Image (cartoon, rainbow, N blue to C red):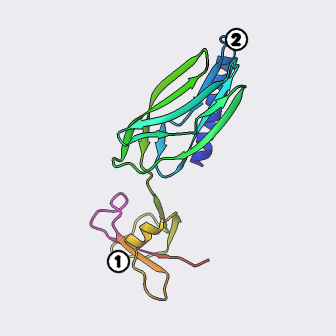
Amino acid sequence: MWKDRQTLQCLISVLLAFLASASLSPGKPKYMVLVPSQLYTETPEKICFHLYDLNETVTVRAFLQSSWGTRSLSNEFVVDKDMFHCDSFTLPRVSASDEKVSLSVHIKGPTHEFNKKSMVLVKNKESVVFVQTDKPVYKPGQSGTKVHHGLWSQEAIMNMAQRRPGSLDLTRKFSLSLFLQSSFGLSLWIKTYAP
């Protein structure tokens, strides 16, 4: 749902920017680069280029500069006519939980050069687990039916689960301090079924 919302916001931004810039400077080359202001590591991200009203062949490059080095976001390419082009890229995990990095775009032709730098935030991908129970609050000693929603990475399962031979039961004890008093413990049993 969030990715669809992000895509819609991006599309609306492109349309608004296109309409505003279409009436400005007729005949001059126009460049638009679309990249999220917040990028996540270890997940596919996209950068899109929209070049139009070109009157010469140009070379386009985009890259990130940070404490971990320089990383190209797309292969350098040459454009001689109007074009809309998107490239996917994946950033490696960063040591800090989030880091501001510099995004640089260079568009160069025989008679014209365009350079733009801006800051974007790079955050490490985080896994989230949603647990739904049959009632909002459990008292000490109570049990109930628990329904699990969300994705579990293999690493997370191996770190938190105890595998028993011949069983696919995964058990983890934790405390729900947001919903229960911190003194209340809650055991969670998740049944998984092999496909």
Mark 1 Cα-neighbour bin, 10 Å: few <14, some 14–19, many ≥20: few
Which amino acid does the dot numbered 1 rest on?
A: Gly
**Residue at left offset 65%, top offset 12%:** 24
**Horizontal and vertical percent position of residue 114:** 55, 20
| Pointer 2 residue | 26
**Horizontal and vertical percent position of residue 107:** 57, 25
| Pointer 1 residue | 141
Identify the element where label 2 is drawn.
loop
Q: Is residue 168 left or right of residue 195?
A: left
Q: CA distance from mark 2 to mark 1?
A: 74 Å
Instruction: Name the disc covering residue 162, or none.
Output: none
Q: Is residue 18 left or right of residue 38?
A: right
Q: Which residue reaches farthest front?
A: 110
Q: Which residue reaches farthest bottom?
A: 166
The residues colored magenta run 174-189
**Residue at left offset 43%, top offset 67%:** 155
Which amino acid does the dot numbered 2 rest on?
A: Pro
Q: Is residue 152 visible?
A: yes
Q: Is residue 18 magenta?
A: no
Q: Is residue 187 visible?
A: no
Q: Nearer the viewer, residue 149 or 115?
A: 115
Q: Is residue 190 above or below residue 68?
A: below
